[in-house]
């Protein structure tokens, strides 16, 4: 499921806090990004429509229906497909070519590759 940046902001609050009232989400996002209550509620509605979150009463409580990992997996797959023609190795090569890795990062990557075999 594709989540836009605004929807991810709402979801981040839920992933960090768990079930949370819409009012609290609005307060958090007002502090973090300056959104009005109306803006927050509009984005919550979009997330509801996508079934990314569920609403329960009383108190307009929201809870995530997808995990952060599911959202990351979708976004990663979309990035690989869109910019790298579906070739994950080209994405990794691009990332690795942009900066020097520490010995610890190299060791972690080697470990990951071994686990994938």
Image (cartoon, helix red, strand yellow):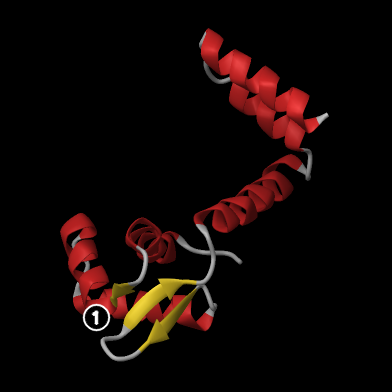
Against 44, residue 92 (above or below) is: above
**Residue most toward the top?**
103
Q: Quadrant of the N terminus?
A: bottom right
Q: Is residue 28 left or right of residue 83?
A: left
Q: How many marks?
A: 1
Q: Which residue is mark 1?
A: 38
- Residue 8: give x, y in percent of width and height: 43, 60
Residue 89 found in image quarter: top right
Q: Is residue 85 left or right of residue 111?
A: right
Q: Residue at x 59, y 53 (%)?
A: 75
Q: Is residue 37 left or right of residue 70?
A: left
Which of these two is toward me, 95 or 116?
Answer: 116
- Residue 27: give x, y in percent of width and height: 18, 68
- Residue 43: give x, y in percent of width and height: 37, 75
Q: Residue at x 41, y 63 (%)?
A: 11
Q: Residue at x 33, y 90 (%)?
A: 57
């Amino acid at each position: 499921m594709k989540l836009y940046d605004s929807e991810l902001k709402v979801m981040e609050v839920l992933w960090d806090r768990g079930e949370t009232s819409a009012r609290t989400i609005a307060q958090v996002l007002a502090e973090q990004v300056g959104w009005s209550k109306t803006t927050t509620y509009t984005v919550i509605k979009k997330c509801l429509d996508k079934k990314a979150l569920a609403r329960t009463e009383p108190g307009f409580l929201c809870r995530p229906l997808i995990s952060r990992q599911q959202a990351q997996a979708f976004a990663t797959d979309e990035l690989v497909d869109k910019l790298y023609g579906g070739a994950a190795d080209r994405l990794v090569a691009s990332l690795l070519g942009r900066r020097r890795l520490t010995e610890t990062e190299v060791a972690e990557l080697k470990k990951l590759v071994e686990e994938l075999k």
